[in-house]
Amino acid sequence: MAIKDKPNPPRFRPFNNIFLILGIGFLAANFILPSILGPQIPGVPYSLFIHQVQEGDVARVQVGQNQIQFQLKPETEIGGEDLGQVYSTTPIFDLGLPTLLEEKGVEFAAAPPPKNGWIGNVLGWVIPPLIFVGIWQFFIRRGAGGGGPQGMLSIGKSKAKVYVEGEAAKTTFADVAGVEEAKTELVEIVDFLKTPGRYTQIGARIPKGVLLVGPPGTGKTLLAKAVAGEAGVPFFSISGSEFVEMFVGVGSSRVRDLFEQAKKQAPCIVFIDELDAIGKSRSSNGFYGGNDEREQTLNQLLSEMDGFAAEDATVIVLAATNRPEILDPALLRPGRFDRQVLVDRPALSGREAILKIHAQKVKLGDDVDLHAIATRTPGFAGADLANLVNEAALLAARSGRPAVAQTDFSEAIERVVAGLEKKSRVLNDKEKKIVAYHEVGHALVGSLMPGSGRVEKISIVSRGMAALGYTLQLPTEDRFLMDEAELRGQIATLLGGRSAEEIVFNSITTGASNDLQRATDLAEQMVTTFGMSKVLGPLAYQQGARPMFLDQGMPNARRSMSEETAQAIDREVKDIVETAHQQALEAIRHNRDLMETITTQLLETEALEGKTLHHLLDQVQAIPVT
Ligand code: ADP
Ligand code: MG
Ligand code: ZN
């Protein structure tokens, strides 16, 4: 596709607009203006006109395309009007009319162009374009004047923000923790930027593009800034979604502009956030040309990256995405983003290091144990941890403490995990009872099942939007692998809430829908992704690679398969969930008395945690093997 020769900046596409203007002119000349300027002739129904003709009252007729005008003979009148009055009627398709008129001796002719026609036509063709041009001028003036860089005239200009070394607070690798492998790989990039000569001398090609891949909030943007900070080079940053605008051609001209600026300041870094917004696979578009604009932008980006040769300035493009699987393969070819750096969620020690970085900004009390906090926050990304420290500081300030205490962190963890406490949402007594049994059900089953972590807290104080009550289970360590029994245990735990409701109330509420969703998803993954079904064997029934991050991957499409296989999968999934359901029911029935004890206590205190809870749950009895 020829995109290089697009006018820059592209706007106002003359041909489209001329047609638009002609169209408006046509409309005005034929419909709008005649109705304003045209002679006001009273209209009558066609049937009346024919009747008048047959009666011999009509003197002459002018047949136009949309209108028939006729003049009555002097001695007749319609509705008390004066003699010889002119009337009009709307013609219907009537081939017999000329014959009839001839018979009755009416003088008739085709209508000449309407009297006011030429004025109407001229005005019709001149005024709308004038209005159009006026509006256009208005926008342009606004763009050039008060509108500033956001105005219409500047739509082709790159919006890249530039951070030059020494300008803002310098970001370095010391500000990033928990992503050591990524850092190691990026140290090399820093070296390329600092001393490109060393590499080009022996003919090595400096990589042009590095793709940072990882879930949101893990520090991709931060790392890119740190690379620029370490190398002491300018940092151009733009987000992929900013490229994609409503005007065709703007995105590509923005890309061109960005690289023009960057080359002038080389060596430097161009950072493209949300690369997937422009780099979506072109084949996944559905229709051909489904998104022309994005495609053009992508093409421009590709040709810019191919464009700057080794002897040119050193511009290294860093890009970030959390959906690498949807990127166009052309982006990942050698010479483009041929290096990929995984920026994953931090493990225990990484979390502690990140907490240390962010805790420097607040006053910590003596009792704060960052290691303990890191232990309680598996799955938190860097941004969540930064947020956690801030929440804790806010809580401490609110309660007037001079420094942040460990209790502030505990409370902040709960807030970040389950959303802010919603004091305003009050459950009635019946609902409270149901929620209490539901949560105790989770806790009971959870404490029996392998792989679902220790139950740390049960609460029926509603939090956030979704959860009415919640059961907090904390794994004692980071888990990377799970076996089949543990997954089945998790499913049973998820169904524990609903099972408790079934047993106690003999009915089911809407409260368990999220549990069911998660349980079913897990069971389906066991069958289609992890190959854990004996019937279906160790096959992957999902199309393509497993989503990179389990918790945010959208469910993959299934591979094409026979109808029987599809049915077999459905049966297996149902079987796994139903077995887990029976297991949960049994576990609860077996501990029915204990459930009453715990629920009664929970209803009194609204929350159970720590030693009290552990002591109660230690009494849970395993289901006897029969
Ligand atoms: P991403 O670009 O991956 O979505 P960001 O780099 O924008 O994440 O992270 C947002 C904020 O979270 C950062 O500004 C920083 O304060 C904090 N943060 C994220 N990851 C880390 C990390 N690995 N080390 C230290 N702070 C981090
Ligand atoms: Mg980011
Ligand atoms: Zn539940």
Image (cartoon, rainbow, N blue to C red):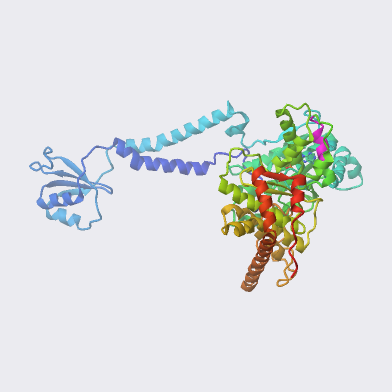
Horizontal placement of 45 versus 159: left or right?
Answer: left
Residue 234, placed above or below residue 184? above
Is 457 in front, or is 577?
457
Q: Percent x, y for residue 189?
A: 85, 43
Residue 44, placed above or below residue 407? below
Which corner quadrant of the image does residue 517 belong to? Answer: bottom right
Is 203 in front, or is 354?
354
Q: Please state the extent of the stretch shown in magenta in the rendering.
A: 353-362
Is 9 in front, or is 355?
355
Q: Percent x, y for residue 107?
A: 15, 48
Residue 626, placed above or below residue 98? below
In reply to whether residue 354 is colored magenta, the answer given is yes
In reply to whether residue 257 is colored magenta, the answer given is no
Which corner quadrant of the image does residue 11 belong to? Answer: top right
The residue at the point 71 percent across, 71 percent down is: 536
Horizontal placement of 112 versus 455: left or right?
Answer: left
Magenta span main SS: helix
Q: Percent x, y for residue 205?
A: 85, 48
Quadrant (top left, top right, bottom left, bottom right) of the C terminus:
bottom right
How many numbered discs? 0
Which corner quadrant of the image does residue 462 belong to? Answer: top right
Q: Is residue 117 visible?
A: no
Q: Percent x, y for residue 552?
A: 69, 52
The residue at the point 87 percent across, 42 percent down is: 187
